Image: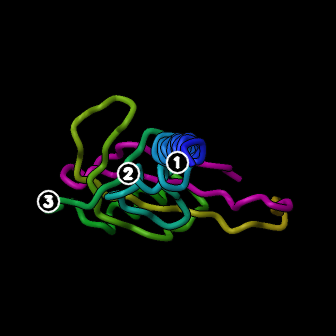
Amino acid sequence: MRWLSRHQTIVFLVVLAGVIWGALWLVYDYRSPVNQYLRAFGSVQIDDWSYNDLDAICIRLEPANGTPVAAADAAGQMAAKANPGGYVREILLVSFHDTCSGASPLLAWAVAVSWAPTADTPLGAGESPPRAIVLVDAKTGSLIVSHVDGKP
């Protein structure tokens, strides 16, 4: 019986080590769905842009905490002017963080722009339609950043 209790202890320690390793992977590995959820927790999602898409271009959008001076319509017009031929899909008031520079957050209008596929530029299999995200300062109405992904 004494051998059996040692065997159970070893099995318990091996299982415990496996569970700890698995938990660490879930929390710290960037490919883990738990890690992706934890990083995106508290962020705002805008039409057709995932947290990982925005993170790749150093943008983090969080809920707004302020009153805008510039109107949402003006932000939509600026986005349409910056991306000719595109149409505005969604406009959100957000707190914009530039994750690469670490600058202070700005109150901004986030504008999602998309283009309809045309006969000249049809989409290939598995290809996503062109899109853009435009951030306009909600206090001054000036363009902060415009990023186009797969421009037609």
Q: SS of the residue at dot 3? A: loop
Residue 22 in sight from this viewpoint: no
Q: Nearer the viewer, residue 89 or 19?
A: 19
Residue to which mark 2 is pinned: 135
The answer for how far apart the CA atoms under marks 2 and 1 are is: 43 Å
Q: Say whether disc 3 or disc 1 marks the residue closer to the N-terminus.
A: 1
Question: What amino acid type is highlighted by mark number 2?
Answer: Leu
Q: In the figure, 31 relative to 47: above or below?
A: above
Query: Which residue is painted at 55% across and 64% down in the image?
Result: 48
Q: Nearer the viewer, mark 2 or mark 1?
A: 1
Instruction: State the image coordinates of residue 148 (x, y, percent, origin top left).
Output: 57, 48
Residue 59 percent across, percent down from the top left: 41, 44
Residue 110 percent location from the top left of the image = 38, 58
Callout 1 secondary element: helix
What residue lies at 37% left-to-right and 37% top-to-bottom?
Answer: 99
Q: Nearer the viewer, residue 112 or 83?
A: 112
Q: Which residue is mark 1?
A: 19
* Residue mark closest to the camera, 2 vs 3: 3
Residue 90, image quadrant: bottom left
Looking at the image, which residue is at 39% across and 67% down? 91
Q: Amino acid at mark 1?
A: Val
* Residue located farthest toward the top when viewing the structure as drawn: 101
Instruction: Specify the amino acid type for callout 3.
Output: Gly
Disc 1: CA contacts within 10 A as few (<14), some (14-19) or many (>=20): few
Observer-side mark, 3 or 1, equals 1
Over which residues does the magenta segment extend?
A: 124-152
Q: Is residue 125 magenta?
A: yes
Which residue has dot 3 on it? 66
Q: Are marks 2 and 1 in contact (CB under 8 Å)?
A: no
- Along the polypeptide, which appears first: circle 2 or circle 1? 1
**Cα gap from disc 3 to disc 1, whole angstroms:** 44 Å
